[in-house]
Amino acid sequence: MGQLKPTKPLSGFIELLPVQQRCFDECAERMQQVLKTAGFSRLDLPAIERAEVLTDKDNWDEIETQMFMFQKGDTKMGLRYDGTVGLARYVSGHLNDLIFPFRAYQFARNYRGERPQKGRYREFYQMDLDILGINELSTNYDAEIVAVLARAYESCREFIGGINIRIGSRPFWNAFFEWLGLSEKQSRAVFVLIDKKDKLDDFNGALTEEIGDKAVEIINVFSNGYKSFLNKSIKLDLAINEIDEFIKQLEVLGIKNAKIDLGIMRGHAYYTGLVFEFFLDNFPSIGAVGGGGRYEDLTGKFSKTKIIGVGAAVGFSRMMVALFEDDKIKLDKFESPIIVSVLPMDENAVPFTMSILTQLRAANIVTIPYLDTGKKFKNKIEFADKIKSKFSIIIGEDEVNSNMLTIKDMMTGEQQKLSLESVINILKKIK
Amino acid sequence: MGQLKPTKPLSGFIELLPVQQRCFDECAERMQQVLKTAGFSRLDLPAIERAEVLTDKDNWDEIETQMFMFQKGDTKMGLRYDGTVGLARYVSGHLNDLIFPFRAYQFARNYRGERPQKGRYREFYQMDLDILGINELSTNYDAEIVAVLARAYESCREFIGGINIRIGSRPFWNAFFEWLGLSEKQSRAVFVLIDKKDKLDDFNGALTEEIGDKAVEIINVFSNGYKSFLNKSIKLDLAINEIDEFIKQLEVLGIKNAKIDLGIMRGHAYYTGLVFEFFLDNFPSIGAVGGGGRYEDLTGKFSKTKIIGVGAAVGFSRMMVALFEDDKIKLDKFESPIIVSVLPMDENAVPFTMSILTQLRAANIVTIPYLDTGKKFKNKIEFADKIKSKFSIIIGEDEVNSNMLTIKDMMTGEQQKLSLESVINILKKIK
């Protein structure tokens, strides 16, 4: 026999234990249920796309570092890094099959080829949700999507705690930079500084270096609040008004934990309107666990039809794994979903056990049998104990002959002899 | 603007419309629910594995043709082609974290790099289920896993129809070849011929070419039945007895649609015991939609601990897409899951609409609003119609002032003015 192969997954890849996986799946399921109730259709797009769909760049060395790329025949292709590229392609190819405004979500694996760092994975689940309109799309949908997403996180409150939302505005900054008289180059530089604000040692100094005295006004936005800039320009007034209206709409939608934070920029170039980020109340150090905003052109590279959208993404794996790593989620509830184990005493008891098993499962009772009948009784009951099944049913000659079951409460040790019907009635009520 | 990018997915990749996706998801969910009720834990393993985990081969040209491979730093890696490699690695790395017999399932995407053909995809969902024991595992579990899988297919009967099961036996053929006195080379050749039996023009001729007169006995197995070979050798008797016992066990488990078909071989080299395949009653031309069997050594390459298992795989994408392609599944039921659309008449009605929307969704009623209030009334009602929402609620000044809702049955055209509470009570009952 040669050397044994490695059993650890590759670095940057996530692999959970069954108990964590159950919690992961439960949260994923609850969030998706909220999206379905809001009428979002699930899309499950290929994880592999043509290279030209994934990128506009020509620098293959760099692209191959950032992504997982491969070539088959003449076709270069690679693993997607987010849900947006595939969505843009899909929607452009199905303009006549879909009804607009079209609402879709994806809960899918995405891939990054770079060297992994703490909290950044090479393979991760992201939940993307988008509402798309042809040529137009009311900003009312922006408020709706924030409310839907808030409700999605809320559905997992018992595991992840509460969330709070910060709202930023691209139109505000565009109007502000224009009012300040910044050049396009200066605007871009300031945009990047604001985006990185919390990571900079000397934000004010960096700003002053870029735009001199005008830095003071930017700093005033954060110290005096955006409303102090009313009546400076029509565009600024419009942007400020849009922010205020948005907060009001969120309140009508039952969202009270949103606040304006004009430091929220969302790096992506394609956002054009309001942007937003979600944070966990109890674990702010994880950073944003989701966010999104409005964009004016989703599909320009695929279609002449103009698609406007508002979308958001949840960094689902990142959030869950961060919570698992520091034991921030109590997993008791997921320790075992097994209601009952059935334990035949010997091979003669197997047919009766199989028939009991079939009927318990038909009643939707999660049941596991222990069928290595040659093992000692001790091993059988230990198995029932280790898998944390709530009850066990021991099946021996007596049970086969009497057609009655001995059921044991694994917590209290209490035993009862009952008919299958009574057993089913009891176990059906156990959650 | 440059040339538009292609909107079709790469060949060999599956992309569904929302209505098909809902059916796909519903079937996947039902099948997984059956596995959970049978106590199988879901594992969600990385799609990317080290090359050395994926293959023992050294011929990289060939491997890169068959798989999607890439290199990062010094590490060669690739996309998995089935669930078994990852399972073997995972289980070997978690021997102390898992309780044996360990039952796990995967519902995951797998990848094949070869040129796609009809019915063979480059990316596809496969559902793998396995029961694993350390050093030993009763063959009782073989019957259980077939029964669980049968029940999983049955849970989708209204979409895919009924299934039938064919049981083969590796021990039977091993004993048979030994009794016939075939060399190892002959045995291997005959094994391959039996595996391809239905695809060969002249099975008998091919057999005779390999093993001369002895071919007659092989053909007798298929014409006279395996039981006619009782009392030829102890090993054959044992194998025949195992088959008969298995069928009896399946009957106790409520499985009546299984029959012996010794032509079922299952290509994979690692099977060592009984093997089985599942077929759709109504669509036999699709071929096997799943199958599996017993194997004696899952983890030899990863661990010194011997893991014995019985496992099965469902070719889920292949089955569903074949059914979709020829319109073999009625999708009516999945046309629209939208219960009600809420249509504000103008911008003034939006806050009230948002509040109604929130309350309807809180009651788990699938609700979509149409928030482009500037559009004509005709557009709004057309939207409700196109998305096939079962009801619509039109919200104008009257509704806002009276706090009463006008609800329209989109099928009958009937309208009623009701309180929100009454609306919720009605809509909650709609499925």
Image: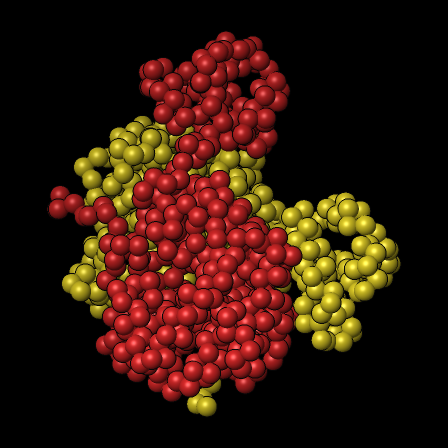
Chain colours: A red, B yellow
In front here: B92 or A108? A108
Looking at the image, residue A160 lies above or below residue A53: above
Residue at the image point whose x is 50% and y is 59% from the top: A259
Looking at the image, residue B279 lies above or below residue A267: above
Looking at the image, residue A315 lies above or below residue B301: below
Q: Which quadrant holds residue A52?
A: bottom left
Using residue A420 as the reference point, say whether residue B303 is left or right of it: left
Residue at the image point whose x is 44% and y is 58% from the top: A290
Q: Position of residue A191 (x, y in %)?
A: 38, 75
Using residue A415 as the reference point, say whether residue A63 is left or right of it: left
Looking at the image, residue B136 lies above or below residue B94: above
Count of marks placed on residues: 0
Q: Which quadrant holds residue A195?
A: bottom left
Q: Position of residue B21 (x, y in %)?
A: 56, 59
Q: Position of residue B118 (x, y in %)?
A: 47, 67
In front here: A320 or A147? A147
Q: Which quadrant holds residue B296?
A: top left
Q: Position of residue B304 (x, y in %)?
A: 18, 37
Q: Residue furthest bottom?
A: B1
- For the question of whether residue A391 can be seen, the reply is yes
Using residue B271 as the reference point, say whether residue A418 is left or right of it: right
In front here: A408 or B380? B380
Residue at the image point whose x is 43% and y is 35% from the top: A334
Residue at the image point whose x is 38% and y is 62% from the top: A110
- For the question of whether residue B204 can be seen, the reply is no
